[in-house]
Amino acid sequence: MIMTVLDRFLKYVSYDTQSDENSTTSPSTAKQLVLLKELEKELLALGLKAYSTKDGYVFATLPSNIKNAKKLAFISHTDTAPACSGKDVKPQIIKYVGKDVVLNQKLGVIFKKDAFPEINDYLGQDIVFTDGTTLLGADDKAGVAEIVSMLEYFIANPDVPRPEIKVAFTYDEEVGRGTEHFDVKEFGADFGYTVDGGQIGEISYENFNAAAATLTVKGISVHPGEAFGKMINAIDVFNDFHALLPESERPVSTKDRQGFYMIDEVKGDLENLTAKYIIRDHDKEIFETRKKYFVECAEKINKKYGDGVAFATVKDSYYNMKEKLKDSMHLVDNAVKAFESVGVKPLILPIRGGTDGAHLSFEGLPCPNLSTGGLNFHGRFEYIPVPSLFKMVDVLVEIAKSYAN
């Protein structure tokens, strides 16, 4: 029995594949390999040349049926974000009729349409929601399901011209290590796409330049009754440091290509405190300025409290793939044509985040990012319209066919 893309998606979200940003193993959680092994079996059953790499990725190839074919890649990750539980996901399909949606009557979890107005674009459509207790996993199991269904189309229609199609399913994308062990040479594609974006129609060939930054504070504890002129409260020091970062340059106050500083984690007490930040900007020069300013803020703090109280470190995470894709814009052009051919308006948007494609583009595999159709990733109000799942399969098929000309 042939599974639909919806069937596949509902199957894949039943697997708990949450990654762990605090883990030092690779993959960060062993449970990610369970779904990857299942995907390998499915691809082999479809007749593809599929295998698990020594590091646990799943690579597969559908041979071309034309001469001198290009090698076109489609890539998605299988892990879900650490920000919200991905265990025991209970998807439910509800027709959106323009009203708030009760996700969980017992717990009183309600999807409020005014809080997420984009849902009004899908009025009258069947939508896959969560039950309000976990994320859904459309990021990026929708992409996985769409890729497998695209492969199934070509297998079922062997006379349709196609390039050599290379597929990769990865892990740990959500913790920034999705391509840490990805061997581009072994994979063997000429160029490709990650299928990891949001609302239907998205095409992205720009992303943030990104860095991880850490502030370490060393305080001095003294009995509060005798603290005058002696105590250095690490928490107060941190507050002073954080206040130096412009409030208008935080994620909640920025959009489009505007960058930001974001506090991600704070741990500590009066004597020892560590604060973790992320720094983002699309513009490389502004990105460098942001990193420099972060360190300068620590220097300002030390002028106030004394040398060695505050120490800042900054480490680059990834860069804007735009500079690596400027000579491969046929990927964007063909994606635009594919969306238009199936009646979907293309939306060329910068990614306010990162993507495996950014890393791969810098490693020699140009990879813009395509939508999956999902929205509100990483939380209990994540959802995906059912028609978007099916449309994305059509889009991937059209893109692949365009490289068989």
Image (spheres, helix red, strand yellow):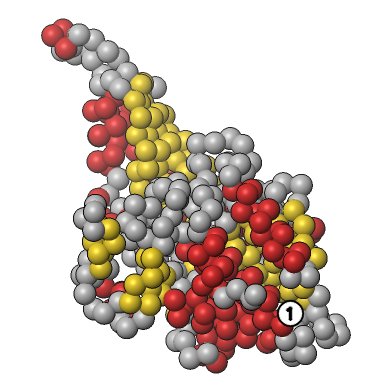
Q: Residues within 10 Å of mark 1 (few under 14, many from 20)?
A: some
Q: Amino acid at mark 1?
A: Ile
Up/down of 271 relative to 360, above or below: above
Q: Where, quadrant-wise, is the C terminus in this rendering?
A: bottom right
Q: What is the quadrant of residue 253 in the picture?
A: bottom left
Question: Which is nearer the eye, 1 or 13?
Answer: 1
Q: Position of residue 151 (x, y in %)?
A: 68, 75
Question: Which is nearer the eye, 14 or 224?
Answer: 14
Q: To which residue does mark 1 refer?
A: 155
- Residue at the (77%, 85%) spot, across then down: 158
Q: Is residue 331 left or right of residue 376?
A: right
Q: Where, quadrant-wise, is the N terminus in this rendering?
A: bottom right
Question: Which is nearer the eye, 391 or 350?
Answer: 391
- Residue at the (57%, 89%) spot, across then down: 337
Q: Is residue 179 left or right of residue 256?
A: right
Q: Position of residue 305 (x, y in %)?
A: 28, 23
Q: Position of residue 33 (x, y in %)?
A: 64, 48
Question: Which is nearer the eye, 328 or 169?
Answer: 169
Q: Position of residue 178 (x, y in %)?
A: 60, 52
- Residue at the (29%, 36%) spot, across then down: 241
Q: What is the quadrant of residue 28 in the picture?
A: top right
Secondary structure type for disc 1: helix
- Residue at the (34%, 34%) spot, across then down: 266
Q: Is residue 389 left or right of residue 311?
A: right
Up/down of 77 relative to 204, above or below: above
